[in-house]
Amino acid sequence: MPETELKLLIVDNADDARTVREMIESTAGPRFHIETAETLVSALNVLARHSFDVVLMELVLTDSQGLATFETIQRHSHGVPIVIHTGMANEIQALTAVERGAQDYLMKGKPGCQALVRVLQYSVARGHRVAEFGKPENVEAKAIGFLAAKGGVGATTLASHFSVELARQSGAKVLLIDLDLSARSASFLFKTDSRYSVMDAATNLHRLDGDFWGRIVAHTPYGPDLLQGPGAVGPADPLSGERVRHVLRFARALYSFIVVDLGRAGPLLFRLLEEIGEIYLVTTGGMLEMYETSRILQRLASLGFTQNKVRLLLNRVSGPSFVTKSAIEKALGRPACWTLPDTSSELDSAYTSGNFFSQTPALRRQCELLVTRSLGAEENAPVIQPPLWSSAMESLQRLFSSVVGGSRESVKSASGR
């Protein structure tokens, strides 16, 4: 790519974008590497993957209209200069757009080829000047995911405790995002009863600003903010992974840490992997849980989600068992980042008392240590090379056979007595 080539994103319908491309390419001057997007969501996707020198955009798209379109692109473009190029003749809107940070407001059909290129050049130059002397870029929040190997393994409970302890230890702003489509477990634990959920944020990307966010997020008395799952409000359609990605990207500018309750592995999870720094995969010692855990680890590895980003949490481990921690680790080819004891009786008492976070000292202590490690300590556990899928299945089968065999021997001993 030549040094003089500038990277331009055109956000417009296909026909108008083609016309603009032809105008620019027919003009002498700097060369432009041009990419296009026809919708707001596709534009946000492109901005998430690539950097640009300037954006040229229409205000009326199929999924967003008006100044809200500009403001959404502006929030996700990280200071890239934006030129509005629209068919909407509205002087008040033009003035408002410039006051809110647009480099220029051009009517389609008015500027000639040379004038359009000059506007883009000047916008890039002004943008570089502002970047040179402007405020330092904000550090984005670290996103931590909790993924359940199977329903009922306690991932929501751990994600909730982890977020509370993370807020306490760090003293920073923490957000918990619940992505459960059917249940309202996190809302129950945090005693929230908001009318809004992550679905409202995902379907209103064009309205997503500080004021709107303040209305839809629940400010809990335990430290973290909570963006409820759709299931907390009522039956919901499947979430758009692309839209949730941009909700997460928006929230990262507002918080120091984001904890995401990912629920079970599915299409939504794989859309969000790029945005999640590390994942705690929660499982138990049950055979079905082990089988699902192995499948998830295999899938994450195939997607390039490296081993040091996936941390295995063994939950509800209770004393001596045929299925030991070391046997599980060997079968999965993965060391456990943390092993949590069975605190079922403690949790039952907490549910009964209605003071979930204050009545679970054993679980809270475990999450305190886990957060301490997450914030600073490096993982010192030996790295076990992950087995191939066939080897993992053989290991699990041997583990299962040993459990069944051990159980039979126990029965024989008991009958002999």
Image (cartoon, rainbow, N blue to C red):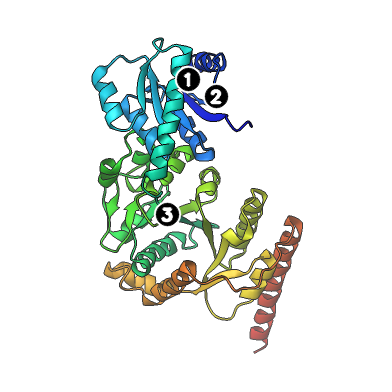
Depth order, front residue of 402/395 = 395
Residue 410 shows in the view: yes
Q: Position of residue 49 (x, y in %)?
A: 54, 39
Q: Which mark is residue 61?
A: none
Q: CA distance from mark 2 to mark 1?
A: 8 Å
Mark 3 falls on what kind of element? loop
As helix, strand or loop, the secondary structure at mark 1 comes to helix
In the picture, the disc for residue 141 is 3
Is there CB contact under 8 Å for labels 3 and 2?
no
Q: Is residue 305 above or below residue 223?
A: above
Q: Position of residue 95 (x, y in %)?
A: 26, 24
Amino acid carrying mark 1 in the image: Val
Front: mark 3 or 2: 2
- Which one is in front, 326 or 62? 62
Out of 369 and 94, give the one closest to the viewer: 94
Q: Earlier in the sequence, mark 3 or mark 2?
A: 2
The answer to the question of whether label 2 and label 1 lie on touching residues, with beta carbons closer than 8 A, is yes
Asked which quadrant contains residue 132, the reply is: top left
Instruction: Give the side of residue 110 with respect to residue 384, left or right.
Output: left
For the residues labelled 3 and 1, the Cα–Cα distance comes to: 37 Å
Specify the amino acid type for callout 3. Ala
Seen in the picture, residue 300 relative to 36 is either above or below; the reply is: below
User: Callout 2: helix, strand or loop?
Assistant: loop
For the C terminus, the quadrant is: bottom right
Q: Which residue is mark 1?
A: 117
| Residue wearing tag 2 | 30
Res. 203 visible in picture: no
Q: Residue at x 37, y 70 (%)?
A: 169
Q: Among all residues in the image, which is located at the extreme bottom?
A: 417
